[in-house]
């Protein structure tokens, strides 16, 4: 056994021991529905372990650097020392926002603020939701995501205990956005966080959600997140994920969406921080006339590695999916895009589109792009494509001939290139924050 395999085995053994210790202290909760799924999931994690590069879905992403550290027990009680002043730069500048703050996987009540409150709405932590909406959580928990074929999803399910729970009851149009601020406090310890999120949008309801990830400190951290989203008939969910992790931060996350008739779901993922990032985004169309949009932007430098895997699973007829991912890669960075559209035999009248475009700023940057179509119906409109290249020198020359310096011309062109994804953000204050960050990062040396 080589050193890499030994490191993975050691961490796996430690986590299995952590789970056994956790079980001993559950008392009455050990018989609940949630824990029954935890116990089943830990068996799959014990069998599957952490993903390795010989797996087709992980052939371009090596998680070993993230697994060789001595992490704190993810189930250990933790009290954050962060104050409001420590997180003020991470907050969205809008008065009416539901703010949920998690630090190293633990809910920080004193830093959070909930403004949308009524008997048909819940916005809060997973653990608090279990006290007031247990039946709803138990009916949806681990129903949509599959942990039997993913060691990381199985691990998260086994350790599920904290994260966010958002519930929009029948007919509820939640006007105040939900900002989920996830912070890795890496100033003194090395943490492995297991966040579990559940979002339930019932008939004719809607909600806007922004997941935001930041790192404080220079030590290593690892966040493994699973988010399940249930979109019932005629519901709408707008979902944004912004990854601002530090250079020693690792992130793996799975978002699993279940869409029923006439529902609408939109996701925009912005990745511009982190050592290794892996995003799995999947939506299943379980009803007719459903609509789904996936947007992504990754802006990479140094030795950053971002891997985006998407899956639009068309099971029902008359559905629409649209996917646009764009990358800007500099230095020795690596991007991976693997997008799959599945059109099953009953999914006639499907419209599905997928595009992945990349600009390589440096000769040493790398992109692996693999758009895929699997079509088993004959009355469909589907297309996919991928491009990679460099900045257009003719366009650069045109701008420079108008008196614009080369670096400013470069920034303008890259900003225009990224604008298709940025414009998908309908949350004005969040969009403004991202536009400012994008402009700073595009300026050479920032």
Image (spheres, helix red, strand yellow):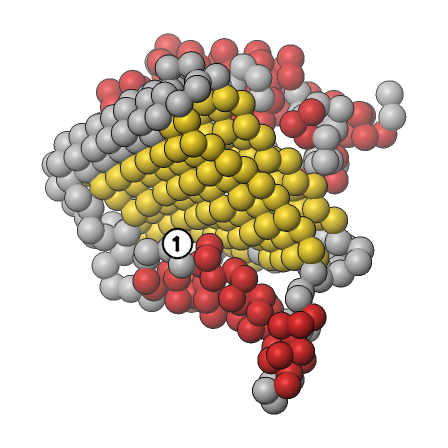
Q: Which residue is mark 1?
A: 424
Answer with left or right where residue 420 lies relative to residue 362: left
* Residue 150 falls in image quadrant: top right
Decide which of 105, 73 is in the foreground and name it.
105
Q: Residue at x 42, y 65 (%)?
A: 433
Residue 155 lies, in percent from the top left, at: 55, 24
Residue 407 lies, in percent from the top left, at: 66, 78
Decide which of 146, 104 is in the foreground and name it.
146
Residue at the limit of the structure toward the front, as seen here:
379
Residue 382 lies, in percent from the top left, at: 47, 32
Q: Is 379 placed above or below 128 here? A: above
Answer with left or right where residue 308 lies relative to residue 269: right
Would you say residue 136 is visible in this rendering? yes
Would you say residue 38 is visible in this rendering? no
Q: Residue at x 80, y 25 (%)?
A: 5
* Residue 95 falls in image quadrant: bottom left
Decide which of 105, 29 is in the foreground and name it.
105
Residue 116 lies, in percent from the top left, at: 19, 48
């Amino acid at each position: 056994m080589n050193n890499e395999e030994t490191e993975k085995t050691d961490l796996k053994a430690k986590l299995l021991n952590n789970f056994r210790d956790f079980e001993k202290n559950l008392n009455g909760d050990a018989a609940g529905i949630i824990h029954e799924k935890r116990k089943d999931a830990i068996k799959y994690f014990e069998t599957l372990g952490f993903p390795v590069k010989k797996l087709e879905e992980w052939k371009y992403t090596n998680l070993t650097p993230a697994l060789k550290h001595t992490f704190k027990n993810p189930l250990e009680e933790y009290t954050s020392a962060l104050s409001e002043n420590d997180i003020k730069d991470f907050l969205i500048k809008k008065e009416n926002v539901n703010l949920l703050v998690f630090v190293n996987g633990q809910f920080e009540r004193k830093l959070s603020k909930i403004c949308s409150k009524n008997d048909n709405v819940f916005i809060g932590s997973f653990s608090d939701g279990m006290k007031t909406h247990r039946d709803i959580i138990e009916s949806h928990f681990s129903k949509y995501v599959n942990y039997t074929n993913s060691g990381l999803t199985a691990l998260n399910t086994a350790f599920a205990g904290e994260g966010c729970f958002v519930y929009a009851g029948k007919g509820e149009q939640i006007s105040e956005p939900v900002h989920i601020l996830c912070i890795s406090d890496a100033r003194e310890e090395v943490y492995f966080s297991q966040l579990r999120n559940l979002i339930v949008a019932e008939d004719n309801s809607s909600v806007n959600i922004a997941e935001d990830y930041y790192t404080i400190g220079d030590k290593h951290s690892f966040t493994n997140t699973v988010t399940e989203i249930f979109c019932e008939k005629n519901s709408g969910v707008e979902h944004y994920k912004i990854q601002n992790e530090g250079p020693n931060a690792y992130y793996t996350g799975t978002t699993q969406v279940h869409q029923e008739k006439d529902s609408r779901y939109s996701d925009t993922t912005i990745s511009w921080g982190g050592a290794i990032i892996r995003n799995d985004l999947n939506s299943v169309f379980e009803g007719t006339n459903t609509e789904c949009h996936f947007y992504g932007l990754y802006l990479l430098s140094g030795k950053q590695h971002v891997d985006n895997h998407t899956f639009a699973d068309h099971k029902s007829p008359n559905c629409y999916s649209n996917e646009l991912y764009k990358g800007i890669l500099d230095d020795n960075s690596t991007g991976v895009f693997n997008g799959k559209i599945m059109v099953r035999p009953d999914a006639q009248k499907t419209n599905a589109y997928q595009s992945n475009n990349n600009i390589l700023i440096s000769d040493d940057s790398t992109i692996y792009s693999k758009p895929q179509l699997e079509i088993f119906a004959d009355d469909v409109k589907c297309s996919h494509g991928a491009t990679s290249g460099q900045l257009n020198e003719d366009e650069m020359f045109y701008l420079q001939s108008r008196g614009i310096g080369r670096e400013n011309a470069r920034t303008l062109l890259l900003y225009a290139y990224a604008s298709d994804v940025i414009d998908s953000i309908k949350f004005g204050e969040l969009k403004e924050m991202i536009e400012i960050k994008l402009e700073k990062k595009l300026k050479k040396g920032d």
